[in-house]
């Protein structure tokens, strides 16, 4: 299941890259490829098991990413969740 520790590790990696001089536009690519895409990929498997508390923590992480300029869009867990096309 998704762990906030996982995102904290990636946030530290992003801060390290920023301190080493990586431009903000490239940091955004790293954020979308490491964090946003992996959450979107894993959501169909565990999306129904997310508690309200964990949902709020993930949304808070997305707010921090937006506040620090790592994303250009305001993301929430429900926006990242892929829309199902029909029945399985």
Image (spheres, grey):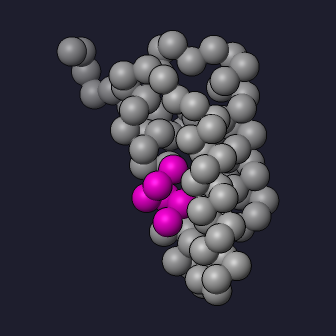
In percent of the image, x 57 and y 18: which residue is there?
50
Q: Would you place residue 33 above or below residue 1 in this image?
A: below
Q: Position of residue 11 (x, y in %)?
A: 65, 56
Q: Which quadrant of the structure image shows residue 18?
A: bottom right
Q: Quadrant of residue 76?
A: top right
State which region is magenta. Answer: 30-35
For the C terminus, the image quarter is top left
Q: Where does the image place residue 62, in percent across and percent down from the top left?
A: 67, 47
Taking the image as shown, residue 32 lies to the left or right of residue 69, namely left
Residue 4 appearing in the image: yes
Residue 59 falls in which quadrant of the image?
top right
Q: Is residue 65 above or below residue 39?
A: below
Is 16 located above or below residue 32 in the figure? below
Report the front residue among 23 and 81: 23
List x then y, in percent, for residue 25. Answer: 56, 78
Outermost residue to the left: 88
Position of 21 with respect to 48 (left or right) is right
Q: Residue at x 28, y 28 (%)?
A: 85
Whether residue 76 is situated above or below residue 44 in the rendered picture: below
Q: Main secondary structure of the magenta part?
A: helix
């Amino acid at each position: 299941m998704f762990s906030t520790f996982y995102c904290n590790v990636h946030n530290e990696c992003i801060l390290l890259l920023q301190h080493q001089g990586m431009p903000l536009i490239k940091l955004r690519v790293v954020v979308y490829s490491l964090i946003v895409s992996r959450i979107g990929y894993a959501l169909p498997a565990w999306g129904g098991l997310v508690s309200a508390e964990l949902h709020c923590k993930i949304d808070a992480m997305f707010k921090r990413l937006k506040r620090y300029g790592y994303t250009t869009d305001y993301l929430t867990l429900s926006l990242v969740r892929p829309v199902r096309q029909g029945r399985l």
